[in-house]
Image: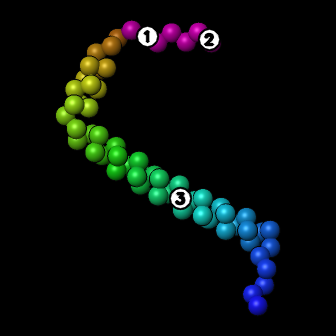
Amino acid sequence: MPEPLTSHDRSRFASEALAARLAERDIQLIRACDVANEDLDVAEIERDLDGIADPIVEPWK
């Protein structure tokens, strides 16, 4: 019968699983950004937004 996992082993397993999942999400996000950057409609929206010159008012300052 295998030895039971210690709390350290469980923590390491959880942190490794979380790190792997976050790395996969990063890859998905990069792919989504690449797709968006190739979209001509997105480029047009970005050009429109770049034309906005009004400063953003930050009421908390």
Residue density around tag 3, few if under 14, some if 14–19, many if 20 or more, within 10 Å: few
Whole-percent x, y for residue 59 in the image:
59, 9
Based on the displayed image, in which of its 4 quarters is residue 7 positioned? bottom right
Residue placed under numbered mark 2 in the picture = 61
Magenta residues (range): 54-60
Residue placed under numbered mark 3 in the picture = 21
Whole-percent x, y for residue 33 in the image:
34, 43
Residue drawn at x 60%, y 59% is 18
Mark 3: amino acid? Arg
Vertical placement of residue 44 versus 14, above or below: above
> Which dot, 3 or 2, sits closer to the camera?
3
Q: Is residue 9 left or right of residue 44?
A: right
Mark nearer the N terminus (3 vs 2)? 3
Residue farthest toward the front in the current orientation of the protein: 1
Mark nearer the N terminus (2 vs 1)? 1
Residue drawn at x 58%, y 59% is 19
Residues at marks 3 and 2, CA–CA distance in whole angstroms:
37 Å
Query: What label does residue 2 carry, if any?
Result: none
Q: Is residue 59 left or right of residue 36?
A: right
Assign the magenta stretch its main secondary structure. loop
Q: How many marks?
A: 3
